[in-house]
Amino acid sequence: MRSATAILSLIALAAAGCGPMRGPAAQVPAALGPAEVLAAHNAWADSIQHVWSRAGLMIDMPNPQKQGERARYDVDGHLFLRKPEDLYLHGQVMGQEVFAMGMNAERFWLWVRPKVNKVWTGRRGGRGERQFVLAAEDLMSALGMFRIALGPTDPATFDVMPAQYVLTQQREFAGKRVPWRRVWFDRRSVRPVRVDLYDEDGRSLLMAELLKYEPVGRTDVCMTYRVRFYGSQEVDLVLRLSSASLLRPVNPKVFEYRLPPDAKEENLDAESSEEIGTPK
């Protein structure tokens, strides 16, 4: 395997070397360069502007009531997405809503009803967003369907693997470059199959695997995700979409924040707030 590593630029991009062929040459597409991969990805991402979908969700997270134990939630609901900022995901058990997560340009929130009936919320870009175990910015990136913009001086590396292309975007920390997002693209489809995100000093924040694509109209959409969030304690999430539509309109009111009846609210931007999942 030969690996091409270069500072990526939208103006001038180095050509990537080819990985080794295993089996007949026809089984592995000829390697594309970074500019071609980004152009193909962005054209696909731009073709998806909003999503209406049924959703099955499994969440495995620390039990907020019992230190050292974990809680698992299996729910059915919907995922609504409207680019660039709006997302709403909710789940029901036997017709009762037990979980909801939303975000818009101003605010993000997570509501869990069983046992706690509590909402964690904060401002987009505020101090609480990094305490939010399902950070708004991170979850959007994990979906893999947003365009990737690289400026002329943005540091990044591009590697050609036998079955994937790997793009690692970087940032400066303590005088050195550390990763902040790594995207794995399938060489055949040029669709993202994995997204890794890192915090400001290069430590892992989450790993999202995009496991299964299906055509929705003429557009391939990932229908099964497996996501692991790394914080003081891990949170695992499996999301399965069904009956998805890229044309069915989404009611704008679903992206508005409303405090559920009798729910307690914790402002994650407050100095006294703690990371979700941390026992109190």
Image: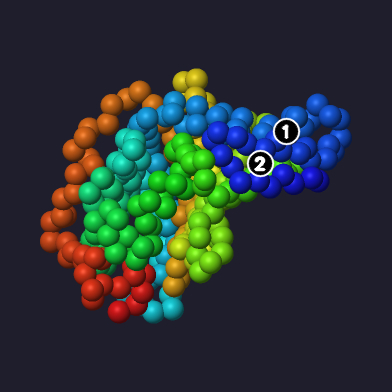
Name the side, left or right, on which 255 lies relative to 68: left
Whole-percent x, y for residue 91 in the image? 32, 48
Residue toward you, 211 or 13: 13
- Which circle's residue, 1 or 2, is located before the other in the chain? 1
Vertical comparison of 195 with 24: above or below? below
Name the side, left or right, on which 262 lies relative to 46: left
How many residues crowd around disc 1 within 10 Å: few (fewer than 14), some, or many (20 or more)? many
| Disc 2: which residue | 165
Residue 77 visible in the picture: yes
- Please say if the residues under marks 1 and 2 sit with CB atoms less than 8 Å apart: yes
Figure quadrant of residue 72:
bottom left
Q: Residue at the left extreme?
A: 262
| Disc 1: which residue | 31
Figure quadrant of residue 119:
bottom left
Whole-percent x, y for residue 23 in the image? 86, 35
Whole-percent x, y for residue 213 in the image? 55, 34
How many residues crowd around disc 2 within 10 Å: few (fewer than 14), some, or many (20 or more)? many
Q: Quadrant of the C terminus?
A: bottom left
Q: Residue at position x 61%, y 46% from top?
A: 7
**What secondary structure is found at the residue carrying circle 2?**
strand
Tell me the kind of residue under disc 2: Tyr
Residue 207 visible in the picture: no
Q: Residue at position x 32%, y 60% from top?
A: 129
Whole-percent x, y for residue 205 in the image? 48, 61
Q: Residue at position x 44%, y 29% from top?
A: 46
Tell me the kind of residue under disc 1: Ala
